[in-house]
C-alpha cells in the first residue's frame, strides 16, 4: 500500500462483477495505479463456493446487503427482500450462476437510443474475449478467457419432462441461449468450474493478486464522491470506523450496482434537486435522473405438487438423503449440491404479437415459500416465470444522511397495465405446459397460486400475491442523453469530469435474461473506452490534513 492517499490513478467502488473486471483490465497497464474498494469482506465463506450454498448466502449479512423494498402497491402492499451481494465478487458470489447474455435486440435498442458502440455486434467480441467456454472457440463463444462457462452437471426426470411438455406447447428445444435470440427451452449454461461456483473474484482478481499497481481493500464503504472545481477528485470512505479521504488523479469509477451507485451519488450532492434539498444536502450537481428508471424482473413462482419423480424436497428431507448429497459432492463435485438454483430454462412469447421472447422460465426440481426458508415437505417442482421487458418503473433514493440507513427501494411492480396483462398471459402459458401430455404421468397439481384463480382479474391478483424479485435491478443511472440520463455513451457522468459509472445502473432498458454477464460486458466496454483515451500525466492533487493520516492497508 502506498504511503500517500493520493497515489491512485483510478478508484473503483464495488468489487462485484464490474469492479473485479475493471480492476483487472486497468491494472494490466503497469503505469496505472488502481485501488478497488469493497464494503463487504473477502469471499472466504464456504457456502459461496458450493453452488447450492446460495440458500445460505441470500439474507446473510456476511454476504448480502439485506435490503428490503418499501411496501409495493402492485404486490398488495407487501415489502419483499431485495438481495444484493456484499462480498468480493458481489452478486456473482450469491447469484444463480446462470450464463446469459440476453437478446441482440436489447443492445441494438441501446444503440438506437443514441448510444453508439453498444449494439450486439459491438459487444459480441467483448463477451467472447472474457469467456472460457466448455465447447471451445466458435463463431459465438470464446475460450481462454477468465469467465468460465460449463454445462449443468446433473439432470432431473421432471425437468426433462417439462422440456418435452414445453415443446408440445410450441416452445422448441435449444442447446444454447446465447446466440442473440434466446427463444426456446433447454438447460442453462452456468458459471462453474468442475462443480464449484466461478465468481468474479476468482475469475478476475485472484490471478492478478500480486500486481504491485493494484490494491484491493475490503470492509471499506464509500460515503461520498469528492468534487473539486466541479471535477470528481476522490472519495470519502469509512475505513476501520474512521472517515478517510482517498484521491483519484484520473477517475473515480462507480461499480456499486443499481442500488448503491445512485445512492452514493445522491449522498454526494448529485441527483434530483428536490431530493437533495429535502435532506439538506447541498446541490453540487443537479441530475434529475439519478435513482429513477428502476427496472427489475418480477418472477411469478408457480408451484406444482407431483408424484412419480424425485425432487430435492424429499431428497433433502432425510438424514440419509443429506449424507448422500454431501458424499456425492465431496467425491464427484456433482449431485444436488452442485446445482444452480435453476437448471432448466425457457424463453417464450406471452402472445404471438411479441417481437421476441418476452418471458423467461426458471424451472426447479424443488419448492419453498421463499428463498431462505425450508423446502416443502412434499414432492414438487417450481416453474418460475418473469416478464423480461417490464414497463413499470421504480426508484431508489437515500433514506437519510446516515449511511447506515438502508435506501428507499420502490420497484413499483405491476404498476403498468401492460405488465399485468403479460403476467396473466404468463400464468396461462405455464398452465398449458403443465397440462401437456409429457407431464401427465407425474400428475401435477397447482399448489401456487392455485386453480381457483381463473379470470383476468383473478390472475392479476395471483401475480400480486406470488410475485417477487428475481434479483435483476437495473437502470437507475441511465445511459443516454436528455433530462433523465445520468451517463453518456462513454459512461461518463453528465457534467462531472473524472466520474464514470459501469454497472447495471447504466442500462437504458433491462436485458432479456439474467444480468450478471451483461454487467461484465458493460465493464469490459468501459475498460476498452478508458484505456483507449489519450495518455496524459496524472494530476497532482495536494493532500489535505485529513488525508495525511496513515493509509489503510488490506
Image: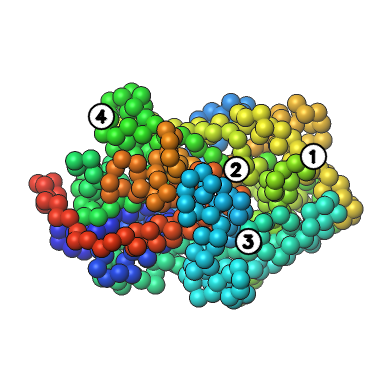
Secondary structure of the residue carrying tag 4 is loop
In the rendered structure, find residue 282 and report the number of the disc placed on it: 4
Residue in the image at 39% along x and 69% along y: 206
Which mark's residue is nearer the viewer, 2 or 3?
Answer: 3
Q: CA gap, disc 3 to disc 1?
A: 27 Å
Say left or right for 553 vs 143.
Answer: left
Instruction: Name the quadrant of the C terminus.
Output: bottom left
The quarter holding residue 482 reads: top left
Q: CA gap, disc 2 to disc 1?
A: 18 Å
Q: Residue furthest left?
A: 545
x then y, percent, for residue 262: 39, 40
Considering only order in the chain, which callout, 1 or 3, is on the residue closer to the N terminus? 3
Q: CA gap, disc 3 to disc 4?
A: 46 Å
Say left or right for 305 vs 333.
Answer: right
Label 1, residues with CA under 10 Å away: few <14, some 14-19, many ≥20: some
Whether tag 2 and tag 3 are in contact, CB under 8 A, the answer is: no
The quarter holding residue 333 reads: bottom right
In the rendered structure, find residue 178 and report the number of the disc placed on it: 3
Amino acid at each position: 500500500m502506498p504511503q500517500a492517499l493520493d497515489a491512485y490513478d483510478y478508484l473503483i467502488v464495488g468489487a462485484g462483477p464490474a469492479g473485479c473486471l475493471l480492476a483487472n483490465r486497468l491494472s494490466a497497464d503497469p503505469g496505472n495505479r488502481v485501488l478497488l474498494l469493497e464494503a463487504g469482506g473477502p469471499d472466504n465463506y464456504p457456502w459461496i463456493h458450493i453452488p447450492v450454498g446460495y440458500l445460505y448466502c441470500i439474507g446473510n449479512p456476511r454476504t448480502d446487503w439485506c435490503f428490503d423494498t418499501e411496501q409495493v402497491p402492485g404486490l398488495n402492499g407487501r415489502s419483499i427482500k431485495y438481495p444484493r451481494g456484499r462480498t468480493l465478487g458481489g452478486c456473482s458470489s450469491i447469484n444463480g450462476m446462470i450464463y446469459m447474455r440476453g437478446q441482440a435486440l436489447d443492445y441494438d435498442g441501446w444503440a438506437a437510443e443514441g448510444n453508439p458502440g453498444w449494439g450486439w455486434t459491438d459487444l459480441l467480441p467483448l463477451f467472447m474475449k472474457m469467456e472460457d467456454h466448455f465447447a471451445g472457440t466458435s463463431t459465438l463463444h470464446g475460450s481462454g478467457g477468465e469467465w468460465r462457462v460449463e454445462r449443468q452437471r446433473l439432470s432431473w426426470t421432471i425437468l426433462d419432462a417439462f422440456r418435452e411438455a414445453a415443446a408440445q406447447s410450441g416452445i422448441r428445444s435449444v442447446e444454447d441461449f446465447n446466440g442473440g435470440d434466446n427463444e426456446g427451452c433447454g438447460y442453462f449454461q452456468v458459471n462453474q468450474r468442475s462443480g464449484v461456483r466461478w465468481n468474479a473474484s476468482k475469475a478476475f482478481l485472484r490471478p492478478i493478486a500480486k500486481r504491485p499497481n493494484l490494491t484491493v481493500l475490503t470492509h471499506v464503504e464509500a460515503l461520498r464522491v469528492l468534487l473539486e472545481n466541479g471535477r470528481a477528485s476522490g472519495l470519502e470512505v469509512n475505513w476501520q470506523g474512521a472517515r478517510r479521504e482517498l484521491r483519484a488523479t484520473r477517475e473515480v469509477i462507480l461499480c456499486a450496482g443499481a442500488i448503491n451507485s445512485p445512492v452514493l451519488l445522491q449522498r454526494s450532492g448529485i441527483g434530483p434537486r428536490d431530493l437533495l434539498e429535502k435532506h439538506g444536502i447541498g446541490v453540487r450537481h443537479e441530475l434529475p435522473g439519478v435513482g429513477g428508471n428502476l427496472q427489475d424482473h418480477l418472477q411469478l413462482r408457480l408451484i406444482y405438487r407431483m408424484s412419480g419423480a424425485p425432487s430435492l424436497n424429499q431428497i433433502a428431507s432425510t438424514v440419509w438423503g443429506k449424507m448422500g448429497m454431501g458424499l456425492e459432492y465431496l467425491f464427484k463435485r456433482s449431485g444436488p449440491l452442485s446445482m444452480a438454483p435453476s437448471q432448466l430454462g425457457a424463453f417464450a412469447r406471452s402472445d404471438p404479437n411479441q417481437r421476441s421472447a418476452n418471458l423467461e422460465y426458471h424451472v426447479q426440481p424443488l419448492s419453498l415459500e421463499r428463498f431462505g426458508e425450508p423446502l416443502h415437505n412434499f414432492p414438487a417442482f417450481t416453474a418460475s416465470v418473469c416478464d423480461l421487458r417490464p414497463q413499470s418503473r421504480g426508484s431508489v433514493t437515500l433514506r437519510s444522511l446516515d449511511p447506515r440507513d438502508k435506501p428507499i427501494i420502490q420497484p413499483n411492480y405491476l404498476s403498468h397495465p401492460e405488465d399485468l396483462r403479460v403476467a396473466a398471459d404468463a400464468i396461462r402459458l405455464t398452465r398449458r405446459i403443465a397440462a401437456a401430455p409429457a407431464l401427465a404421468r407425474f400428475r401435477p397439481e397447482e399448489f401456487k397460486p392455485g386453480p381457483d384463480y381463473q379470470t383476468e382479474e383473478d390472475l392479476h391478483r395471483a401475480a400480486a400475491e406470488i410475485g417477487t424479485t428475481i434479483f435483476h435491478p437495473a437502470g437507475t443511472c441511465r445511459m443516454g442523453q436528455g433530462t433523465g440520463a445520468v451517463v453518456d455513451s462513454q459512461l461518463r457522468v453528465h457534467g462531472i469530469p473524472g466520474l464514470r459509472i459501469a454497472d447495471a445502473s447504466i442500462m437504458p432498458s433491462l436485458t432479456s435474461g439474467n444480468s450478471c454477464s451483461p454487467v461484465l460486458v458493460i465493464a469490459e466496454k468501459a475498460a476498452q473506452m478508458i484505456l483507449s483515451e489519450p495518455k496524459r500525466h496524472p494530476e497532482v492533487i495536494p493532500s489535505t490534513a485529513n488525508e495525511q493520516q496513515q493509509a489503510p492497508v488490506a
